[in-house]
Image (spheres, rainbow, N blue to C red):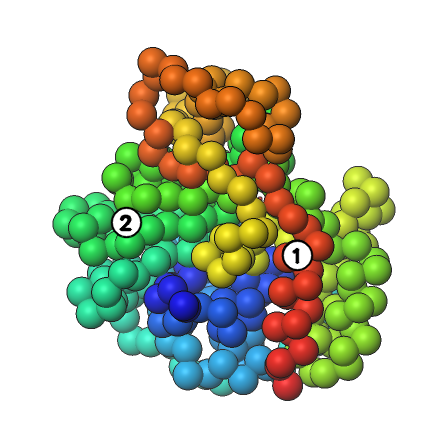
């Protein structure tokens, strides 16, 4: 069964992977764009170029929030380039945007699509703004599968992951909304790097789309391999995979709080796993009861990388 979903994203190389995976595996109702990896203008342009090269132009694209709720805006040109999608040479976009703000689009779709999922793969500003604009929204959203946060280390800071760190106040509103959340954090997504071998497999498919994807991942990964020795994580498509194949990610219920005051931990997703006895969370073990706050999210604690790549490569081969 395909879940009805909107992907809210900041393309971004791995956001494009999420769109391509979602278009074949979700009942995909639209894309909303947000600031993040690059400016809203760039992320929106990149989303338009993606639906054009992948022949997905029936997907509505609605432009969203240009900056965080409170803090200053931050981009990630060091990872995604100035354009937010450096690497491939793509024709200028011609597909038009939906004449509706992303926040209004999300709210409107929540009234017409039963069991709607939101799949945010960028900062959570659009989702938070929708919650502020319509406090009844949680009653019409089946769930949120988000790429963000981490059970262990951050990337933007030692404690916080980029999507959360860009707008911690927005993330706080989402994690306290009461909507069922699957949190796919860096602790699992970093275990699925775009290695040179995987990029070669994609390039070998030899289609326009897969050539663009390989060029994207070459830019996204080759630079990271030079600096860190490991390719870019397939962060965002894993938030889609969480709704597609339950064997790819293993989740545990935990209470997650977003740190808003910490000098060193601003934007951290503090996950309370005290009821999980084994130190290595990837190995199932006894589950105790702890007196902490009740779980408000399912946190991904293990990933089957090979199973993800098998799914993703099969899906990529269906594109022109
Ligand atoms: O920390 C990884 C996340 O930040 C991914 O969503 C990537 O696209 C960037 O937005
Ligand atoms: Ca992203």
Measured Cα–Cα span from mark 2 to mark 1: 35 Å
Say which residue label 1 marks.
307
**Up-down: is 139 above or below 59?**
above
Residue 33 % position (x, y) = 42, 62
From the viewer's side, name the closer residue of 65 and 224: 224
Give the structural element (helix, strand or loop) at label 2: helix
The 10 Å Cα crowd at callout 1, few under 14, some 14 to 19, many 20 or more, is few
Q: Residue at x 64, y 65 (%)?
A: 312
Q: Quadrant of residue 87?
A: bottom right
Estimate the x, y position of residue 1 in percent, counting from the top left.
Answer: 41, 68
Q: Is residue 210 above or below residue 76?
A: below
**How many numbered markers are drawn?**
2
Mark 2 residue's CB less than 8 Å from ligand 2 = no
Disc on the earlier residue, 2 or 1: 2
Q: Is residue 137 visible?
A: yes
The residue under the point 41% across, 68% down is 2
- Label ID, residue 129: 2
Q: Badge 2: few (under 14), some or many (20 or more) residues near its Cα, within 10 Å?
A: many
Residue depth check, mark 2 versus mark 1: number of the one nearer the observer: 1
Q: Please, what secondary structure does the residue beneath circle 1 have?
A: helix
Q: Residue at x 20, y 56 (%)?
A: 140
Q: Position of residue 81 (x, y in %)?
A: 67, 57
Residue 215 makes an appearance in the image: no
Ligand 1 is within 8 Å of the C-beta of the residue at disc 1: no
Q: Quadrant of the C terminus?
A: bottom right
Tell me the residue at 53%/18% (across/down). Answer: 277
Please identify the quarter of the rendering in which residue 303 is found.
Answer: top right
Q: Where 273 falls versus 232 (above or below)?
A: above
Establish if 126 lies above or below 69.
below
- Residue extending farthest to the top is 291
Left or right side of 279 for 28: left
């Amino acid at each position: 069964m395909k879940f009805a979903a909107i992907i809210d994203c900041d393309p971004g190389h791995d956001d494009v992977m999420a769109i391509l995976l979602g278009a074949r595996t979700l009942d995909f109702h639209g894309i909303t764009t947000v600031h993040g990896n690059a400016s809203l203008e760039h992320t929106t342009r990149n989303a338009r170029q993606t639906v054009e090269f992948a022949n997905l132009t029936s997907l509505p694209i609605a432009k969203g929030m240009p900056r965080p709720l409170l803090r200053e805006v931050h981009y990630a040109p060091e990872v995604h380039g100035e354009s937010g999608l450096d690497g491939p040479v793509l024709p200028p976009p011609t597909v038009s945007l939906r004449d509706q703000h992303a926040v209004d689009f999300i709210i409107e779709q929540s009234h017409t699509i039963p069991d709607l999922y939101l799949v945010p793969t960028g900062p959570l500003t659009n989702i938070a703004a929708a919650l502020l604009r319509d406090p009844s929204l949680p009653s019409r959203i089946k769930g949120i599968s988000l790429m963000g946060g981490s059970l262990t280390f951050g990337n933007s800071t030692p404690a916080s992951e980029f999507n959360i760190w860009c707008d911690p106040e927005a993330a706080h509103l989402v994690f306290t909304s009461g909507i069922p959340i699957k949190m796919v954090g860096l602790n699992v997504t970093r275990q699925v790097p775009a290695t040179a071998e995987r990029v070669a497999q994609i390039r070998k498919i030899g289609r326009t789309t897969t050539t663009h994807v390989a060029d994207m991942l070459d830019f996204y990964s080759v630079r990271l391999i030079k600096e860190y020795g490991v390719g870019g994580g397939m962060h965002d498509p894993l938030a889609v995979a969480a709704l597609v194949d339950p064997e790819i990610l293993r989740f545990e219920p935990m209470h997650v709080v977003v740190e808003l005051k910490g000098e060193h931990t601003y934007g951290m997703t503090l996950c309370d796993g005290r009821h999980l006895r084994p130190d290595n969370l990837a190995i199932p073990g006894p589950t105790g009861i702890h007196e902490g706050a009740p779980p408000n999210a399912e946190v991904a604690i293990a990933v089957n990388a090979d199973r993800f790549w098998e799914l993703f490569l099969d899906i990529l081969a269906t594109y022109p």
